[in-house]
Amino acid sequence: MPRLSSTLPRYRKHRASGQAIVELNGHRHYLGPHGTKASKVEYDRLIAEWLANHRQPMVQ
């Protein structure tokens, strides 16, 4: 059984587009312009939802 990592996926910048991104379960989620409050709020929302779902992919 694989070990769960205690680290969270990083808030990163997509260089080509300047968008903030986070990768959850191998899927890239675009959050809006990097460094904005709105993109950080969206990151927090996605991470909270992902953790509440036991680190499993979210149903679209």
Image (cartoon, rainbow, N blue to C red):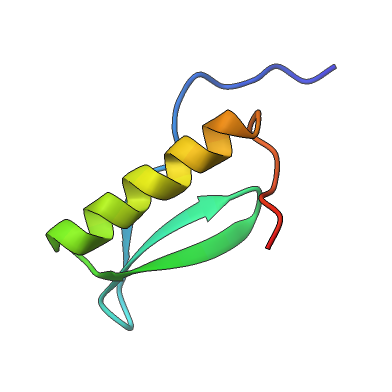
Task: Please name whichever residue, 8 or 36, is drawn nearer the observer in this view of the structure.
Answer: 36
The residue shown at (21%, 62%) is: 38
Relative placement, left or right, of 53 versus 2 is: left
The residue shown at (14%, 57%) is: 37
Task: Please name whichever residue, 17 or 49, is drawn nearer the observer in this view of the structure.
Answer: 49
Q: Quadrant of residue 19?
A: bottom left
Q: Quadrant of the C terminus?
A: bottom right
Task: Please name whichever residue, 44 or 23, is drawn nearer the observer in this view of the structure.
Answer: 44
Across and down, in percent, residue 11 comes to: 33, 50
Across and down, in percent, residue 45 comes to: 39, 47
Q: Quadrant of residue 32?
A: bottom left
Give above or below for 6 relative to 51.
Answer: above
Q: Quadrant of residue 31?
A: bottom left
Give the mark count.
Answer: 0
Q: Quadrant of the N terminus?
A: top right
Across and down, in percent, residue 34 comes to: 21, 66
The residue shown at (78%, 20%) is: 2
Relative placement, left or right, of 19 versus 22 is: left
The residue shown at (45%, 41%) is: 47
Give above or below for 32 relative to 42.
Answer: below
Toward the bottom, the furthest residue is 17
Toward the right, the furthest residue is 1
Across and down, in percent, residue 55 comes to: 63, 33
Task: Please name whichever residue, 14 or 41, is drawn nearer the observer in this view of the structure.
Answer: 41
